[in-house]
Image: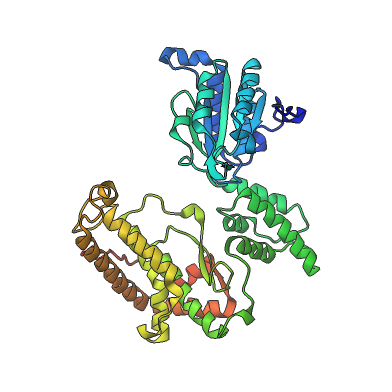
Amino acid sequence: MPRKKANDKPKLQKSKIGFDDVVGHKQIKERLRSIIKIIQNPKMLQDFDVPAPKGALLYGPSSVGKKMLAKAFAKEAKLPYIEISGSKLFELDYVKEVYDIAAKHAPCIVILEDIDIKGILQGAITNVSFSDIAKVLESVDAMVFTIATAETLESIDPVLTAPEKLDFLLEVSKLDKDARKFFIEKILKKPHDPKINTERIVRYITGMSAMELERLGRMAALNVIEQGKKWITEDILIEQINIIKYGHKIETQMVKNLEEELKMTAYHEAGHAVLSTILLPHVKIEQVTISRRSKMLGFVSYNAEDELSNVTKEELFNDVCVMLAGRTSKIRKAGGEEKMDSGAVDDLSQASLQIYAAITNLGMDKELGYINIDSIALLDSYFLSPQIEKRFLHWIHVAKQHTKKLVDEHWEKIEKLALQLIDKEIVEEDELLKIVGKVDKNYPIPESL
């Protein structure tokens, strides 16, 4: 057998970063501090006859700080750690060697980084052997605590999250406001316009990862240098944010009938924005724009912190109406349904999915009642098909009529916003709210649903 290189040998390391060095994630850090107390004071478990926990899984989107949190955990616990990542996760002998070394230096921490990684074995894409790693965790008697990281909980075989393996399952979500502010303040250490509204930029970068925010600072600086300007401005930052989120602007010569296209896009986006402000006022809008980008034609940018989670029937139906408002507004401006175009395909797709879910899985339909088709699909895939089709078409028809009524009622606001978009290209939240004004009227969903 080939001799193992010296630099392939597992190495004990000491973490140089603690929780104070990781921005944001206040709740996760509190949970991790609690876990440290437990592993440092095993007597706490005796009264409950519970064996010492063997590990934790940190899961969440990429570039939100899972690896940093794992290393910070090691420093806060005052313990050495050994890290396994990449192809080494597929080498069972190496994994066993790591745990042998960790056991000899116990108490110790093992970090399994990106354990949901895919590899190629004998020409086939394969997962890390979760069952083998679970057996290794099970076999270690010494105080070795494992922290694994992954993007989703679903990607991890339950054999690894069974009791006395990765006992703690901690979701590390997108960067919170404090973390985003940290990155913006880091960017603003470069030469910048002192009038930049930091809070506004922090709102705009909701949902972006640490990697994207690092890129934002670099691209903003390069853009300043490229244009021969003095410093980073608010406009430069917002343009770079929009590029990262929505793609580059499409050059005007690439668009046929540009002026007419922009005008119709303005009415489409104005319809979305006005009805969203009226029907879903708790979901904040950052900007409405008709700036054409590689990832989409015009768009309404929502604050990702205000996304709906546990959705009511009223919210779902209103959201469908918001989606249909783009095409409805365009049709009214164009002068009839025969003038409709293909620009609403994504809206129709999302609206159809939501209505189907409301009827078949969420038990929201008045006639079909509290049903969930997914739970019985394996027994009978055609169960209630005619009734579902009838109710689906009814929901679509009612949503279309309700949307048309709302668009007609608020047409003056939609037109005012559309004209502003044609003139200025971008309308932001404050300006949008002035155009819509205060709406005291309630719009209950139709009784037939």
Vertical comparison of 305 with 158: above or below = below
Q: Quadrant of residue 342?
A: bottom left
Looking at the image, what colour scheme do you see? rainbow
Residue 242 screen position, x and y as percent: 61, 64
Regarding residue 111, the answer to whether it shows in the image is: yes
Q: Quadrant of residue 234?
A: bottom right
327 sits left or right of 187 in the view? left
Q: Quadrant of residue 243?
A: bottom right
Residue 406 screen position, x and y as percent: 34, 73
Q: Quadrant of the C terminus?
A: bottom left
Residue 190 screen position, x and y as percent: 77, 55
Regarding residue 437, the answer to whether it shows in the image is: no
Vertical comparison of 303 with 178: above or below = below
Residue at (39, 82) in percent of width and height:
332
Residue at (56, 37) in percent of width and height:
115
Along the viewing direction, whichever of 213 and 356 lies nearer the viewer: 356
Residue at (55, 53) in percent of width and height:
207
Give the total of numbered labels: 0
Q: Quadrant of the N terminus?
A: top right
Q: Residue furthest front?
A: 1
Vertical comparison of 100 with 444: above or below = above
Residue 96 screen position, x and y as percent: 60, 24
Along the viewing direction, whichever of 4 and 261 lies nearer the viewer: 4
Residue at (32, 56) in percent of width and height:
357
